[in-house]
Image (cartoon, rainbow, N blue to C red):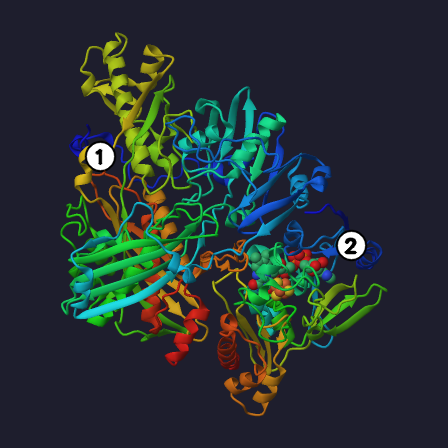
Amino acid sequence: MSSVQDWEAPNPVKDNRSGLIGKGVDRYEGPLKVTGAAPYAYEVTPPSPPAYGVMVGAEIATGRITGVDTVEAEAAPGVLAVWTHRNVPAQPPRGTKAHPRSTSGSRPALESDRVTYFGQPVAFVVADTLENATAAAKLVRLTYTAADPDVDFPHRLDAAGMPPGEQDTEIGDFEAGFAASDVKLDETWTTPIQNHCQMEPCASVAWWEGGKCIAHTSVQMVKPAQHGLAETLGIGRDDVHLLTRYIGGGFGGKGQTYDDLTLAALAARALGRPVKVAFTRQQMMHGTIHRPATIQRVRLGAGADGRLNAMSLMTWTHCQRDGAFTEHASNFARNLYAAPNRLTGHRLVKLDLPHAGAMRAPGEASGTLSLECAMDELAEKLGLDPIELRIRNEPEVDPENGRPFSMRQLVRCMKEGAQLFGWDRRLPTPGQVRDGRWLVGLGMAAAIRGNFLLPAKCSFSVDADGVITVRQGMTDIGTGTYTVLAQIAAETLGVPLGKVVVEIGDSELPPAPGSGGQFGAATAGSAALAAGMNLRQAIAELAVADPGSPLHGGDPNAVTFQDGVVALENRSETLAELVRRAAPAGLTVEGEIRPAQDAQKWSQQTYGAHFCEVGVDPVSGEVRVRRMLGVFAAGRILNAKTARSQLTGGMIWGVASALHEGNAPDLRYGSLLGQDLGNYLVTVQADVGELDAIMLDEVDDKANPMGIKGVGELGNSGAGAAVANAIYNACGVRVRDYPITPDKLLPGLIAKGW
Amino acid sequence: MKPFTYERASDAKAAVQAAVETPGARFIAGGTNLLDLMKLEIEQPQHLIDVGRLPMATIEDTADGGLRIGAMASNTKVAADARVRSRYRVLSQAIVSGASGQLRNKASTGGNLLQRTRCPYFYDTSKPCNKRQPGAGCAALEGHIRESAILGASRACIAVHPSDMAVALVALDASVETLTPSGETRSFPLMELHRLPGETPHLETHLIPGELITAVVLPPLPEGGQQYRKARDRASYATAHASVAVVGGRIALGGLAHKPWRAADAEAALASGATAEEAMGVELKDATLRDENAFKVPLATRLVAATLREAAQ
Ligand SMILES: Cc1cc2nc3c(=O)[nH]c(=O)nc-3n(C[C@H](O)[C@H](O)[C@H](O)COP(=O)(O)OP(=O)(O)OC[C@H]3O[C@@H](n4cnc5c(N)ncnc54)[C@H](O)[C@@H]3O)c2cc1C
Ligand code: SF4
């Protein structure tokens, strides 16, 4: 059994002799992407000319398909196939696992006449061109019996229940503690549905080679995609070769596959030629998952000294009637602040909306929008600075489970951020600072997100040119995985970056869990380090055993690797020379990482503090972010540039959650209002002024052998609350219904006499 | 998208002639609006007449000291023109507050005037919409209507016209020059170009079928200050909750109606000494409001007051 103690030994990543670790090196695949030479799934050229499939979404939210008329569509130019539930090839029932160890069950497309959400794919057209398929898809005529959709989340809380297998977490006696507190706060916040809006919509191309299906798709996790497709097609798992080389954003929305993949594979089999299928931007909004809306009640009770006596965050949220997802917006509150009496939990309503699912910083992104504003409000009630209030409630050990923190530098993040940002210039009374037409305010919030390590494997090869090839069934969803794997390989084997090749996104490579939950770099990277160490060992043994090597007869454990040279004291040769002579076919080894048994003894989190300066136009209620700074503590940073991009990207998403993003269900139709990027607003460049993210020096030796943690979700946690708190400081108006748009801010501004 | 045929017009006369003679023909200029709508099959022209390369992209001084802006002049070109920036800055401000840099590079002056509404139900072809399909009903009426019209709306349609440029042009008292299907040129105030929805929201302008906009003409430099203000959810690439163009004593409003709205009643009230708030009270007295869009009344009022102040500076 592995233990965190095993990770204490020095290793090349920790030693960082050539200084590659942490350096902001450019993206490994950057030139390919910016020149258009990186084929995303839909752009992969199959071995023979493909046909093009287009899906048709249901135009009702709940009911049954009663009539199918495909005559016109079938007769349209270039059409090769038109499928509905009536004639789609047979697929095993949903969730079937013919192979008991499959990481995903079957996901049949067009499975029945039942419609459970608006936009659900209900028909499919394949034609010789995308244009012909698109035109013919409009000619499929379906009739339905529709029931009124049950989608009015705020008015259906009566139907809310405990999420399956969960219970509220109570420590002490919350109600009594709250009642006995000197200063109390009891407020409710609401957050809307959000769509991922990845730049690249979900897309697939599939073809068959004999009994084997080759499928390129856009997915964050390789193995479940491969297994799920095999189960759906009713074939062996090794008969699916699934690839996902380049991914134009995932954000949790591509943690699973969709009907584009299933239908591409089925149609390629039926037609005997490659088939491409992609979601349109409009179809993405309903046909894939979204972050569900929440209603969050926060109750804080404190003594006059600012110490929390009672703390509660209760979240109501929704998921699809057939789904099983809970937006755990209350979870992070269990680890953040000390308070003897605590109550947190979730209630879930099942609705006839499309499927809810994970979106960047699931839980924290929504939950911090309430609690971190509540702390701001409480600070004001107590006459304390918001940072001081947080410091007074800093726990010594994890307040929920009593475990020591592996590392907790939240206070340092807040203090250093305050200094860098000029927090001392904040006036505690709102509405005091004016700059031209703008009222200016400052706000801050804390960030927290758990850290995880999952099992993973990796292989490393060296060839006769001394080139190191990293192979792993990992993905890069734009986060920088290619690049950090290359850095780890170069540092571990002592070769320049130009001598490293990274191959990922392939089900036939050693498995890794993929990208999600900000476990990617730590998990994939630790497996890479292990494989790299094994390759070092193999190379060292090769050298000392080879009479032709100047290292012959030496101690393999003393061999050093630097600048493409293997050396033993003053004896050396290049890696390429050694391999060319002693192992001309090259060497390949595997390595793996497993979570340490005893890692659970520590509470492992990543932390940060956001600072924001906004301008509020008191005439119109418009808000613009003038400056934003995040200071983060997230273990050793592998790449200063890609990590910063992750963090600032998360921060901008926080701005979006505070000010712009949200999709409203239409209660009559069960559809969402925003169906394209003109009507669903995400934050744009002009909305954010100065923006920076700073990463504190940190090494968490309880996290993994490299002491790194994740940053992918952390930047999003708390960012929106900092914006909302800055708005209050600017103008004295609190809006607790996100996003804070002019129509919501204006009544408060008018009431304040602005 | 439905199949269609395409031709590039050799000159304006030929374009108009082709438009009259070919069934289902439409002009296309920058294509930034029409193509999006064709992809969704909201627009289904059988034939496109590309007028984008006609030699109508110049901006010329007129004899009386105004400017004549060719219908093909891009939004970017007009906004950047030195004469526009110095003499008609309200127009420049309005244009750059619309769409995005990329869209403005492609978008033409004529196309901008004739761009269609951004009502989300108009774009969702699974919903009834009288503008798309006369008589089908209006899904917006009982739906989400935060962006909908508060002035001049009807039970048939509550959509707003999204153009910013047109709001400035109305405040500038611009006129439109066209080539009619019978080959004549005509000129009329831009204020009379667009219609209110009434019972026929699918009819958006008073142009005759096949009529080509050839230019927009600005009268000589108006007296008084100029200013454009637009309130919106994000800093760029978003349509207006409300917008205001002030040119001396003239006021035009955007985001509130099915057309750029000349606030004649407010202008008259201001002229007789009313405050901006009082004047807007008069202008908006018949506003039709519901919960979601009621904020447009205080918003427009405050924007007008602030914009008048800024224009006067
Ligand atoms: C997401 C998005 C957001 C936008 N936001 C804004 C905004 O905030 N403010 C704003 O003002 N605009 C906005 N725009 C609209 C943009 O300005 C228009 O798309 C553009 O002005 C249309 O010009 P075009 O030349 O591309 O028109 P086209 O798409 O070529 O044509 C539009 C229509 O005009 C007709 N037409 C074109 N030229 C002529 C002519 N000379 N005579 C007769 N008929 C003609 C065409 O037949 C067609 O019906 C936005 C656009 C998009 C896509
Ligand atoms: S408001 Fe007008 S454009 Fe919108 S749905 Fe109704 S009729 Fe159509």
Residue type at mark 1: give it.
Lys
Q: Tell me the subunit letter for badge 2.
A: B
Q: Nearer the viewer, residue A384 or A79?
A: A79
Q: Nearer the viewer, residue A284 or A248?
A: A284
Q: Which residue is mark 2?
A: B24
Q: Which residue is mark 1?
A: A14
Instruction: Give the percent coordinates (x, y) of residue A614.
Output: 36, 66
Residue at 21 percent of width and 33 percent of height: A596
Q: CA distance from mark 2 to mark 1?
A: 70 Å
Q: Are marks 2 and 1 on the same chain?
A: no
Q: Quadrant of ligand 2?
A: bottom right
Where disc 2 sits, the SS reads: loop
Instruction: Give the percent coordinates (x, y) of residue B59.
Output: 68, 65
Q: Which mark is residue A49?
A: none
Q: Is mark 2 within 8 Å of ligand 1?
A: no
Q: Is residue A126 left or right of residue A525?
A: right
Q: Quadrant of the C terminus of chain A?
A: bottom left
Q: Tell me the subunit letter for badge 1.
A: A
Residue at 84 percent of width and 67 percent of height: B184
Instruction: Give the percent coordinates (x, y) of residue A657.
Output: 40, 58
Q: Quadrant of the N terminus of chain A?
A: top left
Mark toward the viewer: 2 or 1: 2
Instruction: Give the percent coordinates (x, y) of residue A318.
Output: 40, 53
Q: Nearer the viewer, residue A241 or B228?
A: A241
Q: Nearer the viewer, residue A704 or A212?
A: A212
Residue at 64 percent of width and 72 percent of height: B154
Residue at 72 percent of width and 42 percent of height: A72
Q: Is residue B124 left or right of residue A593?
A: right
Whether residue A428 is visible here, answered yes or no, is yes
Q: Are marks 2 and 1 in contact (CB under 8 Å)?
A: no
